[in-house]
């Protein structure tokens, strides 16, 4: 079945339908990772986005039962040059076609993804739709109108929709160990691997909804009668500036003086909480090959990235310092507060997908928690 | 950290002659390194014995030593040049080994030379399998388990947990001989017991086998700060068991999940850190069990390698260039990405296309050699293709091979019964045919171990093929535009589609153009289009947006030489690179088309725009259409572009330089004959034949011996000398089978003639000889396989040389040559014969350029673009000082059971050059460079045929006077004694024992002079030559070669060998 990817500026990319037929709207973004599509599909930060993979073939090793970053496919739509019908990997359980169909996700392949990426690169990310309906000039015109009626990503408070609605303990069996420091993770769309790595650091992790108040989290008895020893601010989708309520609560956590660690959206919220501002990047950073320099040590890490907004480092307050810089475009990749154990990075040290170069940041958080 | 300022001068070691496993990829890496180090302001001292390299052009180093890559010579260069540092990581294993030898001999310490890139300790770790394994295990990286055994019972104990198959390697046997893979208990006992006997220390290594596992490679870079990036991941189509150089490989890896890939990346980082690679590139190989996913590291190379050249071309990340910068202290984040210019090199390239590499073999040159592929590399070249999908890329790679296939389709050959099970060069075609014929993917996977993912993609291509065939046969539903586009996107060539539809290739092309189904050119940009690319490195794809963006300037296209093969290799790439340089110098834009990833020509720095494309009519026309050049140069890339000259010209494409018509006139025997008659030159009596019957009749008429060969081939393919009718009939059948439809050329063979090669330039009016070379061996050995000396050294009367120069001029004018030409002459009983005229670049062009110090390829290209030789100041034959000698290098060690005797079919893979003031010293250096260790004293063995007995006497006398003891077979001994020499007689192999081979094995023979008995090579001689090869004893098969060798030995005895750089005055 034929399908089209139509962008809000009217540019159309023809292809073949994959997954579920129908129409899906979203912000069209591209990801340059060669592998890791299962993690990408299931990453809650991609909520509301149609993700274009630049790799030639996507689906080669199928999808398995272990590598998901959440319990469902999160992307609004999925685009590639080729989704192979078959896959080959001992761990693979279902093909990309099966996975998209089962999840009711609209996909398209056979698209000239290079031309598409070049278009997005020069014009910036755009709203768009994948559709198997809307044939002919009239249909296209109607679809275009519908795309333009969709909300912009700027101003979208998507993080409130994707996270947990109720607090829960991650891996309760581990929590039984009373000696473990208790950490609260605020879920704006948290990836499973973050929770795994926090647990591997020896924490007992409780996951809280995005809008949980600072007062609740800071309560001395919040962690089954004990206080939380540290707070983790997760990744998530959408515009951080739209989450004014969350920013207020984060401010409260920072003021507590207890350790705080933020990743991605968590980094942006922390930035807003300390008085910095955020802005939307032209086409974002999505991939697993971005060089980030540790300002202090000079070491360069190859990082996993997925963000469309960034913290403006010139607006950081005097008690904050820039710790990480993106070497491709000089944007802020991390900062910390000089007067308290609070730090955050824009990229994804939990990888999944991507290189493990920065996993030591979890150990750094662990040290902060154990020292405070 | 910025670059180091404490270093002033850096010694770079090249890799020497082209051999199997170490080819022109090291010219590419060395050229990059030299260029960038000079640009950084360092004084670069280069040693490389290979004159056909771009890196040994004088402008790439401050001091270029075309000298043997031996400890002795390099030590002399160090003593003379006093470099501060040595960069050994861009010259292959040769350079690394030399660095270790220099270290162990104390040379580096004595002269205070620091080793850059890899330390001697890390080189050794990479080499010592057991040490490496232990280090890996200690670091938590899994390896294949193994243990050393001294008894059968110990071996059984070690092997118990492995299961079968099990690998057994005896310790310290020559070339690992006596080892094997045991598939069952009986095999195991047999191989273990044999190995224990064969090992001089009675010890064997028993190792788990990874046969059939999936094989992967990662190419990494590391800087002084420890920042490590993976430049490229490579997946082998052929599973473990086939050398990666002989495997079809794909980049990026296709079948690992991110979790698995990142774990492999972690292991790789551990390996590079633990082995202690200070800076630079490393290649690490992994095996992954297809069922369990268990991953083991197999080996690592702490240097730039063949795979890193491939990775550079596959990704656009110039590994060697960056490795050189890292070696002098830069960090990855201080070096800009060459392609984007704006982002740094401290990142990991990502690909939005698929790269396929397919090796090219030359087994036809080595009859008798097993074509089964294994852990020893046997391929002589490779092609690479880029496409939007695996299928498209694979189809392009197949048609780049130039093995007669049109791509996915080719002549249906009868496959051997075990064609799927045993990995051989043609296995991939058996796989394709089996799938096409309906064998299931599961079944093919089961037998071949090839991952089903790849096989499934082939199935998809075949589904398209079937639809195309149906459309071709259908009147009602002919080939639609959509299907045509789908077929092209699947990698099917126009010629494939012609076969499928029954149309001609021309019809397919016309239909395609009418329908507007044409490729676009996309950029290799390292970043999947995330950033703007400033570098036009292009490949075609049937996609929608063209990124070639040709400028309005006038452009000239250079067609490259395709995959390396015996007879067409580095030398032609050298010429193409110079042609590109000439085009730029004259103010045009240079456009390169080639598909060989190992070369300098496919470095995007070489031309203004690089098209990495198959050299077929279809693919070249697409480039021509896009670029609209003023013309195309076809005379620099050997036979590959020449074959395209006619079709291109017919399509209206201007061919610059000598016209295709003139090329044809020189190649077509009938027309060539009349040309010679016109200019009053003689050829050996000749005839042509299209059938065996014609050939036999012609042979009888001409008289024996005869030289038989097909037309339009390079490297003397299927060329044979025959002495009687039976042999003639056999050779005719063989050649007619191999080259159906092509006329066979039959010449009277001029026995005992001596041969000369001339390279010349012509501009249509003037012909200037660039160099005259004399073959050191008598006629009968292919020019590419013979030692040659420039200028001619003796036996050639001055008058004859004058005659040769005059003849060359007449031929050049008669053919209206514009550009290069090469003429081969023979002088037989005082009379001059023309053997061949090739109005194009020849294999000897770079050698002549190095010997004369003149850029003859560059000048020739300028002539093609309209300059006159007068304008270029090239009106006189360049004077030469001293002697330059070219020595061939052979791959015989790689092919068991192959006779090493030389003949008219070329079998050498590469060459070296020796330069010095005297013939003897030049020969000594050439021999040393070629790995022939001429003895200073000892025992010389003589066995010559009757016709040579008289000629052998002065040579044996010279050997005796140099202090050699003489040993000879009975007949030869009689002749030598008759000349008054003291000779010990030794038995021939078939005369009993101890015979000469026993003596050789016992190390009692230091030099062999063995001239073949003319008509047939007897078992005896084969055994002698093979033993000489295995024992590294110089073996001379012609008297003139023996005389030259003794002259070299005398020259060495007379005094110290000195080294000199090309740049030195008077050099």
Image (cartoon, coloured by chain):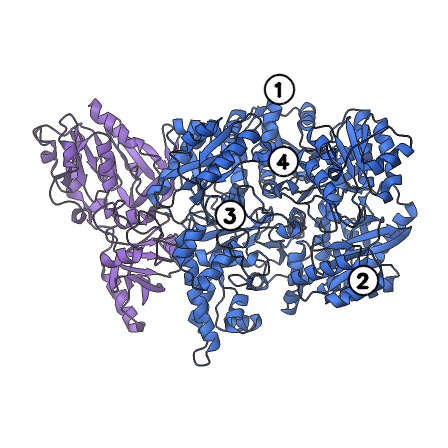
Chain colours: A purple, B blue
Q: In the image, which is nearer the foreground, mark 2 or mark 4?
A: 2
The answer as to whether the residues below labels 3 and 2 share one chain is: yes
Give the residue at x 20% y 35%: A232
Q: Can residue B132 be seen in this view?
A: no
Residue behind mark 1: B106
**Label disc, if present, on residue B961 of the rendered structure:** none
Q: How crowded is mark 3: few (under 14 residues within 10 Å), some or many (20 or more)?
A: many
Give the residue at x 47% y 37%: B188
Q: Residues within 10 Å of mark 1 (few under 14, many from 20)?
A: few
User: How far apart are labels 3 and 4 at the CA level?
Assistant: 25 Å
**In what quadrant of the picture does the N terminus of chain A appear?**
bottom left
User: How far apart are labels 3 and 1 at the CA level?
Assistant: 39 Å
User: Total label count?
Assistant: 4
Cβ atoms under marks 3 and 1 closer than 8 Å: no
Q: Position of residue B439 (x, y in %)?
A: 42, 61
Q: Is residue B742 visible?
A: yes
Which badge, 3 or 1, is on the more N-terminal residue? 1
Q: In the image, which is nearer the foreground, mark 3 or mark 2?
A: 2
Residue behind mark 2: B699
Which badge, 2 or 4, is on the more N-terminal residue? 4
Q: Which chain carries label 4?
A: B
Which badge, 3 or 4, is on the more N-terminal residue? 4
Residue behind mark 4: B14
Q: In the image, which is nearer the foreground, mark 2 or mark 1?
A: 2
Q: Which residue lies furthest to the bottom in this view?
A: B476
Q: How crowded is mark 2: few (under 14 residues within 10 Å), some or many (20 or more)?
A: many
Cβ atoms under marks 3 and 4 closer than 8 Å: no
Cβ atoms under marks 2 and 1 closer than 8 Å: no
Residue behind mark 3: B247
Q: In the image, which is nearer the foreground, mark 3 or mark 1?
A: 3
């Amino acid at each position: 079945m034929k399908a089209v990817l139509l962008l809000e500026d009217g540019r159309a990319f023809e292809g073949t339908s994959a997954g579920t037929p129908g129409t899906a709207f979203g912000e069209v973004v591209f990801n340059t990772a060669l592998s890791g599509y299962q993690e990408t599909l299931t990453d809650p930060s991609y909520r509301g986005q149609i993700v274009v993979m630049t790799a030639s073939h996507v689906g080669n090793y199928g999808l398995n039962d272990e590598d998901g970053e959440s319990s469902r496919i999160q992307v609004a739509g999925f685009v590639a040059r080729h989704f192979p019908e078959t896959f080959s990997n001992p761990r693979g359980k279902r093909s990309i076609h099966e996975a998209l169909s089962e999840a009711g996700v609209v996909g398209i392949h056979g698209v000239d993804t290079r031309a598409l990426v070049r278009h997005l690169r020069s014009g910036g990310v755009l709203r768009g739709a994948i559709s198997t309906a809307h044939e002919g000039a009239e249909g296209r015109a109607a679809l275009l109108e519908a795309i333009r009626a969709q909300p912009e990503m700027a101003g979208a408070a998507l993080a409130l929709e994707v996270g947990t609605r109720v607090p829960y303990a991650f891996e309760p069996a581990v929590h039984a160990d009373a000696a473990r420091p208790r950490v609260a993770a605020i879920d704006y769309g948290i990836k499973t691997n973050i929770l795994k790595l926090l647990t591997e650091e020896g924490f007992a992790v409780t996951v809280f909804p995005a809008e949980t108040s600072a007062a609740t989290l800071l309560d001395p008895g919040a962690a089954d009668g004990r206080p939380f020893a540290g707070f983790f601010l997760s990744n998530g989708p959408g515009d951080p500036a739209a989450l004014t309520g969350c920013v207020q609560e984060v401010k409260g956590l920072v003021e507590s003086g207890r350790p705080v660690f933020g990743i991605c959206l968590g980094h942006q919220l922390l930035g807003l909480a300390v008085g910095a501002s955020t802005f939307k990047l032209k086409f974002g950073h999505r991939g697993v090959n971005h060089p980030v320099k540790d300002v202090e040590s000079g070491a360069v890490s190859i990082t996993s990235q997925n963000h469309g907004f960034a913290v403006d480092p010139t607006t950081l307050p005097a008690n904050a310092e820039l710790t990480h810089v993106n070497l491709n475009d000089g944007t802020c990749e991390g900062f910390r507060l000089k007067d308290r154990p609070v730090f955050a990075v824009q990229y994804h040290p939990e990888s999944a997908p991507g290189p493990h170069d920065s996993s030591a940041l979890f150990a750094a958080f662990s040290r902060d928690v154990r020292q405070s | 950290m910025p670059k180091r300022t404490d270093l002033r001068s850096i010694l770079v070691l090249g890799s020497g002659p082209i051999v199997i496993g170490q080819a022109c990829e090291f010219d590419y890496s060395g050229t990059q390194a030299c260029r960038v180090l000079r640009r950084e302001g360092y004084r670069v001292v280069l040693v490389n014995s290979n004159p056909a390299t771009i890196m040994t052009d004088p402008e790439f180093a401050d001091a270029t030593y075309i000298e043997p890559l031996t400890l002795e010579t390099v030590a002399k260069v160090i003593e003379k040049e006093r470099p501060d540092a040595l960069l050994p990581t861009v010259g292959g294993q040769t350079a690394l080994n030399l660095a270790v030898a220099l270290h162990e001999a104390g040379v580096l310490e004595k002269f205070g030379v620091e080793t850059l890139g890899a330390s001697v300790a890390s080189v050794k770790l990479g080499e010592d399998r057991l040490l490496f394994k232990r280090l890996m295990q200690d670091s938590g990286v899994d390896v294949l388990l193994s243990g050393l055994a001294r008894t059968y019972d110990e071996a059984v104990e070690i092997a118990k947990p492995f299961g079968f198959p099990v690998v057994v390697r005896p310790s310290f046997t020559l070339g690992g001989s006596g080892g094997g893979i045991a598939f069952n208990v009986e095999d195991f006992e047999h191989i273990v017991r044999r190995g224990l006997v064969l090992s001089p220390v009675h010890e064997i290594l028993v190792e788990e086998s990874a046969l059939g596992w999936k094989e992967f490679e990662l190419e990494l870079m590391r800087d002084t700060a420890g920042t490590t990036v993976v430049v490229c991941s490579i997946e082998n189509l052929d599973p473990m068991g086939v050398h990666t150089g002989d495997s079809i490989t794909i980049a990026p890896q296709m079948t690992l999940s991110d979790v698995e890939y990142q774990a492999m990346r972690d292991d790789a980082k551990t390996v590079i850190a633990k082995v202690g690679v200070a800076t630079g590139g490393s290649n690490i190989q992994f095996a992954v069990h297809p069922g369990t996913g268990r991953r083991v590291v197999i080996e690592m190379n702490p240097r730039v390698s063949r795979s890193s050249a491939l990775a550079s071309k596959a990704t656009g990340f110039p590994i060697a260039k960056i490795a050189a910068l890292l070696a002098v202290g830069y960090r990855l984040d201080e070096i800009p990405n060459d392609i984007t210019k704006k982002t740094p090199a401290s990142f990991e390239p990502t690909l939005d296309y698929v790269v396929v590499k397919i090796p090219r073999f030359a087994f036809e040159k080595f009859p008798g050699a097993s074509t089964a592929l294994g852990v020893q590399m046997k391929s002589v070249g490779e092609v690479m293709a880029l496409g939007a999908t695996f299928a498209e890329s694979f189809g392009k790679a197949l048609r780049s091979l130039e093995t007669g296939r049109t791509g996915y389709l080719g002549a249906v050959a009868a496959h051997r019964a075990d064609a799927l099970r045993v990995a051989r060069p043609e296995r991939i075609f058996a796989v394709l045919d089996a799938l096409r014929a309906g064998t299931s993917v599961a079944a093919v996977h089961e037998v071949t171990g090839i991952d089903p993912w790849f096989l499934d993609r082939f199935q998809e291509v075949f589904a398209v093929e079937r639809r195309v065939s149906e459309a071709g046969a259908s009147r009602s539903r002919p080939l639609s535009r959509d299907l045509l586009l789908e077929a092209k996107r699947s990698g099917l060539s126009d010629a494939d589609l012609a076969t499928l539809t029954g149309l001609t290739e021309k019809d397919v092309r016309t239909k395609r153009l009418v329908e507007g189904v044409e490729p676009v050119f996309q950029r290799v940009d390292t970043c999947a289009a995330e950033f703007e690319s400033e570098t036009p490195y292009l490949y075609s794809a049937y996609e929608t947006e063209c990124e070639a963006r040709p400028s309005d300037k006038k452009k000239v296209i250079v067609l490259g030489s395709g995959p390396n093969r015996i007879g067409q290799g580095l030398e032609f790439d050298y010429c193409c690179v110079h042609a590109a340089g000439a085009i730029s110098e004259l103010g045009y834009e240079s456009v390169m088309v080639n598909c060989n990833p190992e070369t300098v020509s496919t470095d995007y720095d070489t031309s203004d725009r690089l098209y990495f494309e198959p050299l077929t009519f279809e693919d070249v026309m697409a480039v021509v259409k896009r670029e609209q050049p003023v013309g195309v140069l076809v005379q620099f890339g050997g036979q590959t572009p020449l074959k395209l000259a006619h079709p291109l010209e017919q399509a209206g494409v201007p061919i610059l330089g000598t016209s295709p018509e003139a090329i044809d006139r020189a190649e077509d025997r009938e027309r060539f004959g009349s040309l010679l008659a016109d200019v009053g030159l003689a050829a050996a009596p000749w005839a042509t034949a299209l059938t065996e019957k014609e050939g036999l009749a012609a042979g009888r008429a001409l008289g024996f011996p005869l030289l038989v060969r097909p037309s339009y081939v390079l490297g003397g393919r299927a060329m044979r000398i025959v002495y009687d009718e039976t042999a003639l009939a056999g050779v005719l059948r063989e050649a007619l089978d191999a080259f159906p439809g092509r006329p066979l050329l039959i010449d009277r063979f001029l026995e005992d003639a001596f041969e000369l090669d001339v390279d010349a330039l012509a501009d249509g009016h003037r012909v200037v000889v660039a160099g005259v070379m004399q073959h050191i061996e008598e006629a009968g050995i292919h020019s590419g396989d013979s030692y040659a000396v420039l200028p001619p050294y003796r036996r050639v009367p001055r008058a004859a040389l004058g005659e040769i120069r005059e003849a060359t001029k007449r031929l050049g004018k008669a053919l209206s040559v514009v550009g290069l030409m090469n003429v081969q002459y023979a002088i037989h009983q005082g009379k001059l014969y023309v053997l061949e005229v090739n109005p194009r670049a020849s294999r000897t062009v770079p050698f002549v350029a190095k010997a004369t110090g003149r850029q003859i390829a560059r000048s020739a290209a300028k002539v093609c673009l309209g300059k006159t030789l007068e304008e270029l100041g090239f009106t006189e034959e360049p004077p030469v000082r001293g002697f330059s000698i070219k020595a061939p290098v052979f791959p015989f060690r790689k092919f068991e059971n192959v006779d090493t005797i030389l003949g008219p079919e070329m079998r050498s893979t590469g060459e070296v050059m020796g330069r010095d003031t005297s013939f003897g010293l030049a020969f000594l250096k050439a021999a040393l460079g070629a790995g022939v260790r001429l003895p200073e004293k000892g025992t010389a063995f003589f066995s010559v045929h009757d016709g040579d007995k008289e000629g052998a006497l002065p040579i044996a006398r010279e050997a005796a006077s140099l202090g050699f003891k003489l040993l000879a077979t009975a007949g030869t001994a009689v002749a030598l004694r008759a000349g008054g020499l003291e000779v010990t007689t030794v038995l021939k192999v078939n005369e009993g024992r101890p015979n000469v081979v026993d003596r050789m094995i016992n190390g009692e023979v230091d030099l062999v002079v063995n001239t073949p008995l003319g008509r047939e090579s007897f078992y005896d001689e084969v055994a002698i030559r093979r033993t000489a090869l295995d024992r590294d004893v110089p073996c001379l098969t012609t008297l003139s070669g023996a005389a030259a060798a003794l002259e070299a030995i005398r020259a060495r005895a007379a005094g110290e060998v000195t080294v000199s750089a090309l740049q030195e005055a008077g050099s």
